């Protein structure tokens, strides 16, 4: 019955749009399928309209995959379109840096885009049109590397389409982060939000303050969930957990991401979620410590004090971070910063009085604004979780709306950029199926159809205000994801739903069609060797 239902769903998709015949995720804006196919072989060439280095980079990933999976790579030359070529041309008339046109004919393939990023997006579509074995890491015998004839005109709905990964609660190696970035590129997601500091671990090397990683990256115990007498409970485990990225590690990750046109946005939390930092530098707290790197999850009282030494410390850190990351943005957190310590701190109360502030919420706004002004001298802008709205929004801040949609609405109405990542739809660490059948996690319930149905533009906004909704992001928090395989299991295929939410026009979205296309995607996941969730095949969709 399930197989018949999925076949029926595929048929419906074909009737609605020929794009569904080629099973691309995210679904293109326009796709017309034709009879026939183009076969890639050792004599096929990639021909570029110029010898520009960026244009060469846009085709390198696909060519590298052919070398691994097919055992041959294609010569890359500058020239004109011809038979048995994949011709890539820059066309300045295209609207949008990521838009592209892909035409697959029996004798040749033609790609046009305004920028190399658009060309790269087209190669990722080709990646999905090739047999799933293109994802193999070893040469595969007996595969015909054919691509169906198709005409595709495509462009993303939103400029910002991302996934977030928390490596503080549980660490992911440099190699795993690189794998994660490749999965983003495969799904045409273009932002990787790298959550690098928190109460439970400091994960990035700062040359001026080596204690941050020497002390702040190691904890000796943590909470976990277990079944006891038929009940799910959280218990303490005595277990050392550590890990951090050297600045050379970061550079390698950034180079890999750049080759895939993925922008990496680092997050350095402040003023809250700072206990790992305070364990190394207790003098920057209100109480003076001592502290240890935290092993429990939740919101903790100890945050950075507003003394001048704190700002000198944070500015030193951000100077190193800004020099490492080419991203326009640095995420500074700003969420879940309890004000109890500030309310009892002589330094913070004097700061409120001297600045003529109303309360501790306005003190946090002043704190964030001061950091924003400093980062602007480094050519950077800030993103913060929606709590940065409290007490007044810093002049050029972008808001990441996680506590629902209200933060994004408020930011857009103030003509500030907003990235929508509400916990109701975009928290990919929540259960995606019946908790009795799933690995223990933090709670909640967000099946894949809930992710897919999300519209990032709230109805409360006018057309002019809606322009400030920059895009959408899925968040993976790792309190209960002990391994990278666990993280992937939580992220996919819900991450594919995030990709389609961010890319595909609202009028073209259809969950039944998406579910049918997931069947082909699963073959590709299998070839990649990743762990993913299949509950969408077993659970009946519940209507909202």
Image: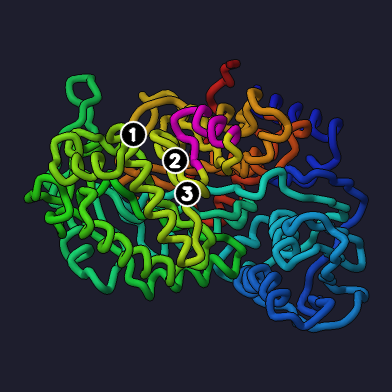
Q: Which of marks 3 and 2 is in front?
A: 3
In the shown orientation, is residue 130 left or right of residue 431?
right
Considering only order in the chain, which callout, 1 or 3, is on the residue closer to the N terminus?
A: 3
Magenta extent: 399-413
- Asked if labels 1 and 2 touch by Cβ distance under 8 angstroms, the answer is yes
Quadrant housing residue 409: top right
Q: Residue at x 76, y 50 (%)?
A: 155
Residue 311 position within the rendered picture, expressed as x and y whole percent measured from the top left:
28, 58
Mark 2 residue element:
helix
What whole-number distance in Å separates the C-alpha atoms at marks 2 and 1? 9 Å
Rate crowding at label 1 as few (under 14), some (14 to 19) or many (20 or more) other CA atoms within 10 Å.
Answer: some
Q: Which mark is residue 273?
A: none
The span from disc 3 to disc 1 (Cα, nearest Å) is 27 Å
Q: Along the line of sight, which residue is nearer the eye, 446 or 36?
A: 446
Which x, y percent locates residue 316? Answer: 31, 67
Horizontally, residue 150 falls left or right of residue 385, namely: right
Of 212 and 31, the residue lying toward us: 212
Question: What's the residue at 47%, 52% (across, down)?
Answer: 382
124 or 11: nearer the eye?
A: 124
Q: Which of disc 1 and disc 2 is earlier in sequence?
A: 1
Mark 3 Cα shell of 10 Å, populated few (<14), some (14-19), many (≥20) = many
What residue sits right under mark 1 in the picture? 441
Nearest to the eye among marks 3 and 1: give it: 3
Which residue was labeled with disc 2?
490
Residue 383 tag number: 3
Residue 518 in view: no
């Amino acid at each position: 019955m399930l197989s018949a239902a999925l076949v029926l769903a595929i048929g419906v998709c074909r009737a609605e749009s020929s794009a569904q015949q080629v099973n691309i995720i995210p679904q293109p804006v326009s796709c017309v399928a034709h009879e026939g196919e183009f076969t890639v072989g050792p004599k096929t060439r990639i021909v570029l309209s110029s010898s520009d280095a960026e244009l060469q980079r846009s085709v390198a990933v696909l060519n590298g995959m052919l070398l691994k999976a097919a055992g041959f790579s294609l010569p890359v030359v500058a020239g004109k379109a011809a038979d048995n070529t994949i011709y890539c041309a820059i066309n300045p008339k295209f609207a949008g840096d990521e838009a592209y046109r892909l035409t697959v004919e029996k004798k040749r393939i033609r790609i046009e885009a305004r920028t190399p990023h658009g060309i790269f997006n087209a190669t990722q579509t080709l990646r999905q049109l090739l047999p799933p074995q293109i994802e193999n890491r070893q040469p595969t015998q007996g595969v015909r590397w054919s691509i169906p004839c198709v005409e595709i005109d495509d462009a993303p709905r939103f400029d910002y389409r991302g996934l977030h990964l928390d490596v503080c609660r549980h660490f992911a190696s440099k190699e795993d982060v690189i794998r994660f970035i490749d999965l983003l590129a495969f799904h045409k997601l273009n932002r990787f939000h790298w959550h690098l500091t928190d109460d439970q671990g400091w994960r990035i090397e700062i040359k001026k303050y080596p204690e941050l990683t020497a002390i702040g990256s190691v904890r000796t115990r943590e909470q976990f969930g277990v079944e006891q007498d038929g009940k799910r409970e959280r218990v303490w485990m005595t277990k050392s957990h550590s890990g951090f990225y050297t600045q050379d590690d970061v550079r390698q990750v950034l180079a890999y991401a750049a080759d895939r046109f993925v922008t990496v946005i680092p997050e350095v939390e402040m003023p809250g979620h700072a206990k790992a930092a305070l364990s190394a530098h207790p003098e920057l707290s209100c109480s003076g410590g001592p502290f240890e790197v935290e092993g429990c999850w939740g919101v903790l009282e100890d945050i950075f004090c507003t003394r001048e030494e704190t700002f000198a410390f944070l500015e030193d850190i951000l100077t190193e971070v800004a020099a490492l990351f080419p991203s326009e943005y640095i995420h500074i957190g700003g969420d879940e910063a309890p004000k109890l310590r500030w309310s009892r701190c002589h330094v913070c109360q004097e700061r409120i009085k001297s600045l003529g502030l109303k309360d501790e919420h306005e003190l946090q706004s002043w704190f964030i604004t001061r950091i924003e002004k400093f980062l602007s001298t480094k050519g950077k802008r800030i993103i913060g979780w929606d709590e940065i709205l409290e007490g007044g929004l810093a002049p050029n801040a972008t808001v990441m709306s996680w506590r629902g949609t209200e933060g994004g609405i408020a930011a857009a109405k103030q003509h500030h950029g907003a990235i929508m990542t509400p916990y109701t739809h975009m928290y990919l660490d929540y259960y995606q199926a019946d908790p009795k059948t799933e690995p223990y996690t933090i709670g909640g319930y967000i099946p894949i159809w809930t992710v897919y149905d999300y519209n990032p533009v709230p109805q409360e906004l006018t057309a002019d205000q809606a322009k400030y909704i920059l895009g959408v992001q899925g968040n993976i928090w790792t309190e209960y994801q002990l391994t990278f395989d666990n993280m992937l299991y939580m992220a996919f295929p819900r991450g594919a739903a995030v990709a389609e939410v961010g890319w595909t026009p609202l009028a073209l979205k259809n969950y039944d069609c998406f579910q049918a296309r997931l069947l082909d995607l699963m073959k590709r996941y299998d070839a990649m060797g990743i762990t993913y969730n299949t509950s969408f095949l077993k659970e009946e969709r519940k209507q909202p």
